[in-house]
Image (cartoon, rainbow, N blue to C red):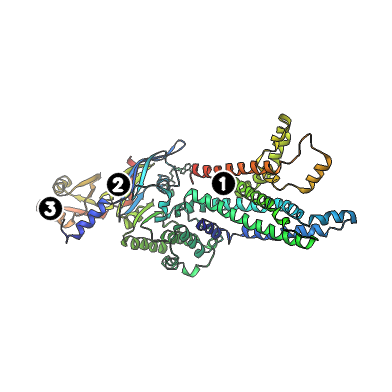
Amino acid sequence: MGHLIKLEWLKMKNYTAFRVLSFLFVLTFPLLLIAGKRIQAPQQAQTFIDSFYSFPTVFEILGYVGNWLAFFFLGFMALLSVTNDYTNKTLRQNMLTGLSRKEFILSKLYFVAAVCGFVTLYYILIGSVFGFFNTPKIYLSDFTDSLAIFGKFYLMCFGYCVFGLLIGLIIKKTGLALFIYLAYTMFIEPGIRWGFHSRVINNSTMHYYPLNAIEDLIPNPLKDKADAFQGNFEGMTIFLSSTEAILVATIYIALFIFLLFFVINKRDL
Amino acid sequence: MYLFDSQLSLDQIRNTMPVLQINGITKKYGRITAVNDLHLTINKGEIFGLLGPNGSGKTTTLGIVLGLIKANSGSYNWFDGSSNNNQNTKIGTILETPNFYPYMTAIENLELIAHIKKAGRENIEPTLELVDLIHRKNSRFHTYSLGMKQRLALAGALIGNPEFLILDEPTNGLDPQGISEVREIIQKIAHSGTTILMASHILDEVEKVCSHVAIIKKGKLLATGEVGSILSDQIQVELISDNNGKLLDLLDNRYEISGLNKSGEKIVFNIDANFSSGELNKLAFENGITISHLLTKKTSLEQEFLEITKNK
Ligand SMILES: Nc1ncnc2c1ncn2[C@@H]1O[C@H](COP(=O)(O)OP(=O)(O)OP(=O)(O)O)[C@@H](O)[C@H]1O
Ligand SMILES: [Mg+2]
């Protein structure tokens, strides 16, 4: 495993897109939170906003920021790591050199798993720093209660990455793959869910779609509050419950991983 | 077998140690049959040339035995009977264009190859030296010229001292000096006992470098064997005498004659390589025949190659 992670690291460490995406991610993650705190608001709203930055809410807010960033930066990174090997024909060269198809996919999976680990640690670190300075009284339980959200954050990052790997592997061409990655998540899947599924079967099964499940691992905390305020949406919430999201996302991630191996084994290279 | 007869035992070792066996491989792309029921055996220590015109299925064949392309039928066996992909860690390969990470330097690219092959890094610099790229070792691959890329591909193939090399048009894109350098390198490597399978559409190259050859056309095997026997170095004779017929009869008893052609008074034919024009003169003199024109030249292998591939 270390051998395969190192292999991917050798490929990525000098890759400009990887460097830029990492840099932007590391920078924007805390900056977005700082920017939010700088918003000048009326006294009433200010206390509301301030509450975002104290334990344990800070992990929900930061997690949701991370949700967007992971979708863009981590998903792109995973996708590019595959199309990079296609456009330079280095996938073929890797096989010639002696890497097996299985090892190729494993090296990508291990690497994104490791990256997601670092990203999750970074998330915990930033959240802790913000929480530390904005929480009047800190209890150990602030962390222990947040363990579940740490796990969900990791699963969410990993989910976007695996989806990025799969789209990259299927489409091969960088530009088109990026387009499909974005279009599927932002238009196609929501379109199917709201435009089609909900008209045919209007129940919570309309939320059982892969990217929606991954997204709902760390849902928008504000919408959740608004949701509670407004009451249920036609008898159901617009989010999957935490357990549902974990279950559905895990199943799809497993399916995507299966497809990664399936597709590469089918191909002439 | 006699202990002191090292030549014999070496030959026996060569003959009895197949490194790669291809058993009736067929690959179709739609209606095109790229490789058609191909059988080949490559033995240890051979420099085996796969010779054929453009599009004859050379690259496809190499792609199949390297596990990149899936054949429709047939099989292949590597040394020990396995045909899994990790076999490739023991093989050095150049297949078509050199493929490297454009944003990485020569050193970094070769380190990646060494990493995959789990080979040491210590022969990276000497290998760059061998292919004459050491002065550019820290330049990124995308800044290389075509010839430099091809040299780096050869260096990549040599990482980890593989026992078997597969080279697809290794001199593609090189200048004349580069071509002769690369050929020298290949021969040097072959001398150290490495088995080499080399695809080429350049006959001259196969003749200069290879010990064995297989000629393919449209994916079909036309001929295979030692280079000397397949691309025999026959001699072409042009002759005008006052009794061509009798002279030919006399020659025919001693030599193998082929490809006889008449143009006016002149006859042209091919004759095996141990023919000497001195003997022809003697024969003519003894039989009272006057020769007014005699010209001998080695048949161009190019011509012969064209003949073999044309007629079938
Ligand atoms: N991916 C592919 N899809 C369709 N046809 C292909 C593909 N690859 C090769 N072919 C066809 O298979 C045949 C053999 O091609 P191949 O590349 O093996 O020839 P080659 O002997 O290596 O030729 P060259 O000397 O030009 O390199 C050609 O007719 C080619 O068009
Ligand atoms: Mg070719």
Helix, strand or loop at mark 2: strand
| Chain of the residue under the numbered disc 1 shown in the image | A
Hey, which quadrant is residue A5 in on the image?
bottom right
Q: Quadrant of the C terminus of chain B?
A: top left
Q: Residue furthest bottom?
A: B135
Nearest the viewer among B94 and A68 is A68
Callout 3: SS:
helix
User: Badges 1 and 2: C-beta atoms under 8 Å apart?
Assistant: no
Residue at label 2? B224
Task: Single out the mark in the foreground, 2 or 3.
Answer: 2
Query: Where does the image place residue A111, in percent across and percent down from the top left?
Result: 57, 55
Q: Secondary structure at mark 1?
A: helix
Q: Position of residue A49 (x, y in %)?
A: 83, 55
Q: Is residue A148 left or right of residue B106?
A: right
Residue B103 is situated, as x and y percent measured from the top left of the image, at: 56, 60
Question: Label 3 is placed on what type of residue?
Answer: Leu
Quadrant of ligand 1: it is top left
Whether labels 3 and 1 belong to a single chain: the reply is no
- In x, y percent, where is residue A262? 52, 42
Between disc 1 and disc 2, the foreground one is 1
Residue wearing tag 1: A169
Amino acid marked by disc 2: Thr
**Which residue, as the protein is rendered here, is positioned at the far left?**
B286
Q: For mark 1, does the 10 Å Cα neighbourhood hold few (<14), some (14 to 19), or many (20 or more) residues? A: many
Which sits in the foreground, B304 or B140?
B140
The residue nearer to you, when weighing B303 against A263, is: A263
Report, in whole angstroms, how far the alpha carbon at label 1 lies from the one at label 2. 40 Å
Q: Which residue is mark 3?
A: B283
Give the residue at x 30% y 45%.
B223
